[in-house]
Amino acid sequence: MKWFKRIATIYLVLMLPVFSYATTLSDLQPHSTTGKPWNEQWFYYFNDPLVGYYKISFQTFLYKDDETSKERGYLHFVYTPLEGEIKTYDYFYDDVSLGAVEDSEYGYYFKIPGVADINENSIKITTDDFSFSSILNGEHTHYWKLNPGASPYSLIGELPFVANRWFTFSLASSAEYSFSSDYSHHEGQAVSYIDKGWSTSQAANYAFVMATEESSQLMLAGGSDEGLPIELWSARFISENNNITFLPSVNGLSVKRTLEPCQGKMEIVFKGIGKSLIVRASADLDDFSDSHVPSTHVFEAEYPSSKTMNANIEIEVRRWGQVVERKSFQQGALEFGGGMHCNAQ
């Protein structure tokens, strides 16, 4: 028993520097810039099963040659209806204010005068093109239990030399929302997926699949970073019958993936002890659009990110080799970026 305690003590001492870098729910709040270039981004995906998806990203950034230390603002909005034309909007602002709410675990505010007033519980956006508002009115489904704000890559993705920080805040949060434009108006209940990232460089390559509903959620992500050149993948799937998490795994070991970004397709197999998850995601190439912030616009990366929220996602769960569940999402997110972008193939 003494030897076990000694080993455990040594392990904890050695891992303390890593634990100090671990993300927590408080990382939903803004961070101080750590260099130039710089980017911090919040992503909210709202799914109304009767209407479609709304994607909202609000960000701050600094160019590498920016002579000031004042962060600029960026607002990105995508409306992907179940049927009809996908609408995408991008706005840049020089005036943005943000900060943490004192004595709050993860409370924050993000404001663009006359345009956006956002905090941890609500979003209110008004532009010349559309208006969107929402209130999160239920519990959040966090990715982990022990540290609900930990990165899906766990401590591996939080090592001090890894440049990109990112975590999933919620796989599903119930919300009330309202959307208005000159071509559409919707309001009602939605389910929101939320994640957050901040960095001083673009990840070398990455892919992302996500779908969220009231009773089922999926998130998987993978790629490599300049500080961690191996290709890591992680995944979580929740349904009425299954709740499984796959720890960060190296491609070619317990993860096998086939990416076809120029075909808008991806297939990946996660394997664990007595369990496996097979995910197939595909979408029409016309439904993908390139996002240049922060990739090429801020970090001057070679390739942008290409993403759609109109992907069809098929899931198969196996226990000890036997299929125990099949699930289909008629809409979800599929993304290829960096070296996984079609232009890099």
Image: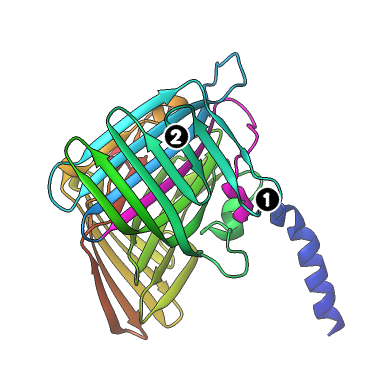
With respect to residue 300, does 23 lie above or below? below
Task: Give the residues in magenta.
Answer: 23-48
Q: Disc number at residue 116? A: 2
Quadrant where the C terminus lies? top left
Residue drawn at 45 percent across, 56 percent down: 136
Give the labeled residue for mark 1. Answer: 21
Residue at the spot 62% in from the left edge and 37% down from the top edge: 99
| Location of residue 268 in the rendering, given as x and y in whole percent from the top left corner | 32, 62
Q: In which quarter of the image is the N terminus?
A: bottom right
Q: In this view, does 242 lie above or below 210?
A: below
Asked if the residue at tag 2 contacts the one at tag 1, i.e. Cβ–Cβ closer than 8 Å, the answer is: no
The span from disc 1 to disc 2 (Cα, nearest Å) is: 31 Å
Q: Can residue 297 be seen in this view?
A: yes
Residue 4 image point, x, y percent: 80, 79
Look at the image and say whether residue 37 sits in the magenta stretch: yes
Q: Could you tell me the amino acid type at mark 1?
A: Tyr
Q: In this view, which residue lies farthest toward the left?
A: 84
Q: Which of marks 1 and 2 is in front?
A: 2
Left or right side of 326 for 127: right
Q: In which quarter of the image is residue 176?
A: bottom left
Tag 2 secondary structure? strand
Label 1: which secondary element: loop
x 34%, y 55%: residue: 209
The outermost residue toward the right is 2
Asked if residue 28 is positioned above or below residue 344 in the image, the reply reads below
Q: Is 84 or 332 nearer to us in this picture?
A: 84
Residue 178 placement (x, y as % from top left): 32, 48
Magenta region includes residue 91: no
**CA neighbours of label 1 inside 10 A, class few (<14), some (14 to 19), many (20+):** some
